[in-house]
Image (spheres, helix red, strand yellow):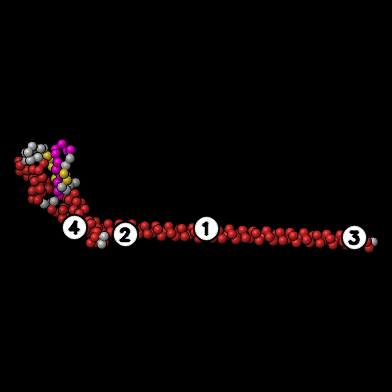
Protein backbone atom coordinates (compact mmCIF):
# COMPACT_ATOMS: atom_id res chain seq x y z
CA UNK A 1 0.00 0.00 0.00
CA UNK A 2 2.92 2.30 0.75
CA UNK A 3 4.31 1.68 -2.67
CA UNK A 4 0.98 2.47 -4.20
CA UNK A 5 0.77 5.65 -2.16
CA UNK A 6 4.31 6.47 -3.07
CA UNK A 7 3.58 5.88 -6.75
CA UNK A 8 0.39 7.92 -6.55
CA UNK A 9 2.23 10.75 -4.80
CA UNK A 10 5.00 10.60 -7.35
CA UNK A 11 2.56 10.68 -10.26
CA UNK A 12 0.63 13.46 -8.58
CA UNK A 13 3.77 15.48 -7.91
CA UNK A 14 5.10 14.94 -11.41
CA UNK A 15 1.73 15.91 -12.91
CA UNK A 16 1.54 18.91 -10.62
CA UNK A 17 5.06 19.91 -11.50
CA UNK A 18 4.35 19.51 -15.22
CA UNK A 19 1.09 21.43 -14.82
CA UNK A 20 2.93 24.22 -13.01
CA UNK A 21 5.58 24.32 -15.73
CA UNK A 22 2.93 24.32 -18.44
CA UNK A 23 0.99 27.00 -16.56
CA UNK A 24 4.18 29.04 -16.14
CA UNK A 25 4.98 28.63 -19.85
CA UNK A 26 1.45 29.66 -20.83
CA UNK A 27 1.62 32.61 -18.44
CA UNK A 28 4.96 33.71 -19.89
CA UNK A 29 3.62 33.30 -23.40
CA UNK A 30 0.48 35.30 -22.56
CA UNK A 31 2.60 37.95 -20.89
CA UNK A 32 4.87 38.15 -23.95
CA UNK A 33 1.87 38.41 -26.28
CA UNK A 34 0.34 41.08 -24.06
CA UNK A 35 3.59 43.06 -24.09
CA UNK A 36 3.76 42.73 -27.87
CA UNK A 37 0.14 43.89 -28.21
CA UNK A 38 0.81 46.85 -25.91
CA UNK A 39 3.95 47.73 -27.92
CA UNK A 40 1.98 47.50 -31.20
CA UNK A 41 -0.84 49.59 -29.74
CA UNK A 42 1.69 52.21 -28.55
CA UNK A 43 3.34 52.23 -31.98
CA UNK A 44 -0.04 52.65 -33.69
CA UNK A 45 -1.00 55.41 -31.23
CA UNK A 46 2.34 57.16 -31.84
CA UNK A 47 1.83 56.87 -35.63
CA UNK A 48 -1.70 58.29 -35.29
CA UNK A 49 -0.38 61.16 -33.16
CA UNK A 50 2.36 61.88 -35.73
CA UNK A 51 -0.15 61.76 -38.58
CA UNK A 52 -2.49 64.07 -36.67
CA UNK A 53 0.41 66.48 -36.01
CA UNK A 54 1.38 66.40 -39.69
CA UNK A 55 -2.23 66.97 -40.79
CA UNK A 56 -2.56 69.83 -38.31
CA UNK A 57 0.70 71.37 -39.55
CA UNK A 58 -0.42 70.98 -43.18
CA UNK A 59 -3.80 72.51 -42.37
CA UNK A 60 -2.15 75.40 -40.53
CA UNK A 61 0.26 75.98 -43.41
CA UNK A 62 -2.59 75.91 -45.97
CA UNK A 63 -4.70 78.25 -43.84
CA UNK A 64 -1.78 80.68 -43.47
CA UNK A 65 -1.13 80.50 -47.22
CA UNK A 66 -4.82 81.11 -47.98
CA UNK A 67 -4.89 84.04 -45.55
CA UNK A 68 -1.75 85.55 -47.11
CA UNK A 69 -3.22 85.10 -50.60
CA UNK A 70 -6.60 86.58 -49.61
CA UNK A 71 -4.87 89.49 -47.86
CA UNK A 72 -2.72 90.20 -50.92
CA UNK A 73 -5.79 90.07 -53.19
CA UNK A 74 -7.78 92.34 -50.88
CA UNK A 75 -4.89 94.80 -50.70
CA UNK A 76 -4.49 94.75 -54.48
CA UNK A 77 -8.24 95.27 -55.00
CA UNK A 78 -8.27 98.15 -52.50
CA UNK A 79 -5.30 99.80 -54.18
CA UNK A 80 -6.97 99.38 -57.57
CA UNK A 81 -10.19 100.94 -56.22
CA UNK A 82 -8.28 103.92 -54.79
CA UNK A 83 -6.37 104.31 -58.04
CA UNK A 84 -9.60 104.16 -60.09
CA UNK A 85 -11.36 106.68 -57.83
CA UNK A 86 -8.48 109.14 -58.18
CA UNK A 87 -8.25 108.65 -61.95
CA UNK A 88 -12.00 109.02 -62.32
CA UNK A 89 -11.93 112.28 -60.37
CA UNK A 90 -9.00 113.65 -62.39
CA UNK A 91 -9.95 112.31 -65.84
CA UNK A 92 -13.58 111.34 -66.25
CA UNK A 93 -15.34 114.42 -64.89
CA UNK A 94 -13.10 116.94 -66.73
CA UNK A 95 -13.27 114.95 -70.00
CA UNK A 96 -17.05 114.76 -69.74
CA UNK A 97 -17.34 118.48 -69.04
CA UNK A 98 -15.01 119.48 -71.90
CA UNK A 99 -16.56 117.12 -74.43
CA UNK A 100 -20.05 118.30 -73.53
CA UNK A 101 -19.16 121.90 -74.47
CA UNK A 102 -20.95 122.53 -77.78
CA UNK A 103 -18.50 125.24 -78.93
CA UNK A 104 -15.47 123.00 -78.43
CA UNK A 105 -17.22 120.05 -80.09
CA UNK A 106 -18.01 122.14 -83.16
CA UNK A 107 -14.32 122.95 -83.64
CA UNK A 108 -13.13 119.38 -83.08
CA UNK A 109 -15.83 117.84 -85.28
CA UNK A 110 -15.11 120.26 -88.14
CA UNK A 111 -11.35 119.62 -88.04
CA UNK A 112 -11.84 115.86 -87.80
CA UNK A 113 -14.38 115.75 -90.65
CA UNK A 114 -12.07 117.80 -92.90
CA UNK A 115 -9.22 115.32 -92.33
CA UNK A 116 -11.22 112.35 -93.61
CA UNK A 117 -10.90 113.19 -97.30
CA UNK A 118 -9.35 116.53 -98.08
CA UNK A 119 -9.02 115.68 -101.80
CA UNK A 120 -11.89 113.33 -102.66
CA UNK A 121 -15.48 113.56 -101.41
CA UNK A 122 -16.38 111.13 -98.63
CA UNK A 123 -19.80 110.54 -97.13
CA UNK A 124 -19.58 110.63 -93.31
CA UNK A 125 -21.76 109.41 -90.47
CA UNK A 126 -21.67 111.37 -87.22
CA UNK A 127 -23.07 110.29 -83.83
CA UNK A 128 -23.58 112.96 -81.15
CA UNK A 129 -24.93 112.98 -77.57
CA UNK A 130 -28.72 113.26 -77.38
CA UNK A 131 -28.44 115.96 -74.73
CA UNK A 132 -26.64 118.24 -77.23
CA UNK A 133 -29.25 117.84 -79.97
CA UNK A 134 -30.63 121.35 -79.38
CA UNK A 135 -27.19 122.97 -79.52
CA UNK A 136 -25.78 121.04 -82.48
CA UNK A 137 -28.53 119.75 -84.78
CA UNK A 138 -29.00 122.86 -86.91
CA UNK A 139 -25.22 123.51 -86.99
CA UNK A 140 -24.53 119.96 -88.26
CA UNK A 141 -27.16 120.08 -91.03
CA UNK A 142 -26.29 123.66 -92.02
CA UNK A 143 -22.79 125.00 -91.43
CA UNK A 144 -20.91 121.69 -91.03
CA UNK A 145 -22.56 119.99 -94.01
CA UNK A 146 -21.80 123.08 -96.14
CA UNK A 147 -18.08 122.97 -95.31
CA UNK A 148 -17.56 119.31 -96.24
CA UNK A 149 -16.90 117.84 -99.69
CA UNK A 150 -19.08 114.75 -99.22
CA UNK A 151 -22.43 113.97 -97.70
CA UNK A 152 -23.09 113.91 -93.97
CA UNK A 153 -25.63 111.98 -91.93
CA UNK A 154 -25.94 112.73 -88.24
CA UNK A 155 -27.71 110.93 -85.43
CA UNK A 156 -28.03 111.52 -81.71
CA UNK A 157 -27.59 108.81 -79.09
CA UNK A 158 -28.42 108.62 -75.40
CA UNK A 159 -25.47 106.22 -75.05
CA UNK A 160 -23.02 109.09 -75.55
CA UNK A 161 -22.68 111.41 -72.55
CA UNK A 162 -20.14 113.64 -74.25
CA UNK A 163 -17.95 113.74 -77.35
CA UNK A 164 -18.84 112.12 -80.68
CA UNK A 165 -18.19 109.26 -83.09
CA UNK A 166 -17.38 109.78 -86.76
CA UNK A 167 -16.58 107.51 -89.67
CA UNK A 168 -17.45 106.62 -93.26
CA UNK A 169 -21.17 106.44 -93.93
CA UNK A 170 -20.88 102.76 -94.92
CA UNK A 171 -20.16 101.97 -91.24
CA UNK A 172 -16.97 100.04 -92.04
CA UNK A 173 -15.15 101.78 -89.18
CA UNK A 174 -15.37 104.86 -86.99
CA UNK A 175 -13.29 107.04 -84.72
CA UNK A 176 -14.51 107.33 -81.14
CA UNK A 177 -14.07 110.74 -79.50
CA UNK A 178 -16.43 110.03 -76.60
CA UNK A 179 -15.76 111.30 -73.08
CA UNK A 180 -15.32 107.68 -71.95
CA UNK A 181 -12.68 106.89 -74.58
CA UNK A 182 -10.79 110.11 -73.80
CA UNK A 183 -10.86 109.53 -70.05
CA UNK A 184 -9.75 105.89 -70.56
CA UNK A 185 -6.90 107.02 -72.81
CA UNK A 186 -5.76 109.73 -70.39
CA UNK A 187 -6.11 107.34 -67.42
CA UNK A 188 -3.79 104.82 -69.09
CA UNK A 189 -1.09 107.49 -69.30
CA UNK A 190 -1.72 108.73 -65.76
CA UNK A 191 -2.05 105.27 -64.15
CA UNK A 192 1.73 104.60 -63.72
CA UNK A 193 2.29 108.09 -62.28
CA UNK A 194 -0.72 107.74 -59.98
CA UNK A 195 0.47 104.33 -58.79
CA UNK A 196 3.92 105.73 -58.06
CA UNK A 197 2.53 108.71 -56.15
CA UNK A 198 0.06 106.63 -54.13
CA UNK A 199 2.01 103.45 -53.48
CA UNK A 200 5.61 104.16 -54.39
CA UNK A 201 5.61 101.53 -57.16
Looking at the rendered structure, the secondary structure element under dot 1 is helix
Q: Earlier in the sequence, mark 1 or mark 4?
A: 1
- CA separation, marks 1 and 3? 64 Å
When asked about the image quadrant of residue 118, the answer is top left
Please name which of the two marks, 2 or 3, marks the residue nearer to the observer.
Answer: 3
Q: Mark on residue 51? A: 1
Residue 66 at x, y = what percent? Answer: 39, 57
Question: Residue drawn 13% across and 53% down?
Answer: 98
Question: Residue drawn 9% across and 40% down?
Answer: 117
- CA separation, marks 2 and 3? 100 Å
| Residue to which mark 2 is pinned | 75
Would you call the spot at circle 3 few (<14 residues within 10 Å), some (14-19), or many (20 or more)?
few
The overriding secondary structure of the stretch rendered in magenta is loop
Looking at the rendered structure, the secondary structure element under dot 3 is helix
Residue 142 appears in the picture as rendered: no
Magenta stretch: residue 167 in it? yes
Stretch in magenta: 161-172
Looking at the rendered structure, the secondary structure element under dot 4 is helix
Would you call the spot at circle 2 few (<14 residues within 10 Å), some (14-19), or many (20 or more)?
few
Please name which of the two marks, 1 or 4, marks the residue nearer to the observer.
Answer: 1
Would you call the spot at circle 4 few (<14 residues within 10 Å), some (14-19), or many (20 or more)?
some
Check the image and report above or below for 135 versus 72.
Answer: above
Question: Residue drawn 14% across and 43% down?
Answer: 166
* Residues under numbered marks 2 and 1 in contact, where contact means CB atoms less than 8 Å apart: no
Is residue 27 found left or right of 151 in the rendered image? right
When asked about the image quadrant of residue 70, the answer is bottom left
Q: Earlier in the sequence, mark 4 or mark 2?
A: 2
Residue 13 at x, y = what percent? Answer: 84, 62
* Residues under numbered marks 4 and 2 in contact, where contact means CB atoms less than 8 Å apart: no
Q: Quadrant of the N terminus?
A: bottom right
When asked about the image quadrant of residue 110, the answer is top left
Q: Mark on residue 7? A: 3
Amino acid sequence: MDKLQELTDKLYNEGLSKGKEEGQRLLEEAKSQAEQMVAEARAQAAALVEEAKKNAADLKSKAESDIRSASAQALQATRKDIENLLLEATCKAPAKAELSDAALLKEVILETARRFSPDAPCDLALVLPEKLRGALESWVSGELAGKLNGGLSASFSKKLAGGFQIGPADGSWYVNFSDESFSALIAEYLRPVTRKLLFGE
